[in-house]
């Protein structure tokens, strides 16, 4: 008789912020960190919640799913502003885009992150069969985007706390 044990799994997402300045004379409603006629306007910022799967039961017949939220927003500046067009890319973490991996010491647990709840398109950097997520240019000062994670069923690995860290890159 095989004893089933459960364990916790999660993925931390670290935000990387890359910005490009607007040319002199750009519209005042921008939220880019831009000096226009001696006035410093705000900038685009990002906050990210962790992807926490909770306790994983290896005997489950379906993939265990969870989600995380990325919020992109204008901060500082004069009179708020609106988001410019942007894209969000995710790194591979400890694995690859074909199979991300959480680790507990030398043990590994496969998982993946997708751009929608139907779990069909891998969220990556746009290379191979991955896609980035686009937003902004919508007249809003903030936008929330949800990412979807899944751990495939029936992975009989050693119990423990499994973790992976990905880099999120916001480009605008």
Image (cartoon, grey):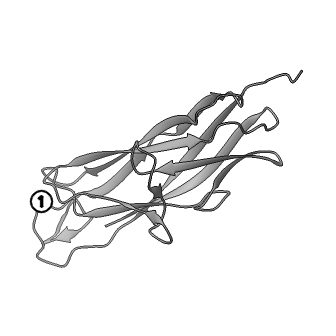
Q: What is the x, y in percent for residue 103?
A: 73, 46
In front here: 25 or 92?
Answer: 92
Counting every numbered tag in the picture gives 1
Q: What is the x, y in percent for residue 76?
A: 25, 51
Q: Is residue 105 left or right of residue 115?
A: right
Q: What is the x, y in percent for residue 70?
A: 39, 46
In front here: 124 or 83?
Answer: 124
Q: What is the x, y in percent for residue 104?
A: 77, 42
In front here: 141 or 1?
Answer: 1
* Residue at x 42% of width, y 63% of height: 131
Mark 1 Cα shell of 10 Å, populated few (<14), some (14-19), many (≥20): some
Quadrant location, the C terminus: bottom left
User: From this viewpoint, which residue is outermost toward the right?
Assistant: 1
User: Dot 1 lies on which element?
Assistant: loop
Q: Is residue 133 left or right of residue 139?
A: right
Q: Which residue matches tag 1? A: 29
* Residue at x 21% of width, y 70% of height: 35
Quadrant location, the N terminus: top right
* Residue at x 54% of width, y 61% of height: 91
* Residue at x 13% of width, y 53% of height: 139
User: From this viewpoint, which residue is outermost toward the bottom?
Assistant: 23
Q: Is residue 85 left or right of residue 118?
A: left
Relative to 79, is 158 above or below?
above
Res. 4 image quadrant? top right
């Amino acid at each position: 008789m095989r004893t089933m044990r459960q364990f916790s799994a999660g993925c931390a997402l670290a935000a990387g912020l890359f910005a490009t300045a607007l040319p002199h004379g750009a519209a005042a409603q921008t939220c880019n960190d831009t000096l226009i006629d001696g006035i410093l306007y705000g900038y685009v910022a990002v906050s990210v919640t962790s992807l926490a799967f909770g306790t994983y039961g290896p005997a489950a017949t379906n993939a265990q799913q969870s989600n995380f939220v990325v919020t992109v927003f204008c901060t500082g500046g004069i009179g708020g502003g609106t988001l410019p067009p942007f894209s969000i890319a995710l790194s591979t973490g400890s694995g690859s885009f074909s199979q991300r991996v959480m680790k507990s010491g030398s043990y590994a647990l496969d998982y993946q992150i997708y751009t929608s709840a139907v779990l069909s398109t891998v969220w990556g950097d746009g290379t191979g069969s991955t896609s980035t997520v686009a937003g902004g240019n919508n007249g809003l000062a903030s936008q929330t985007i949800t990412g979807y994670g899944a751990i495939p069923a029936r992975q009989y690995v050693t119990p423990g706390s499994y973790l992976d860290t990905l880099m999120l890159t916001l480009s605008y």
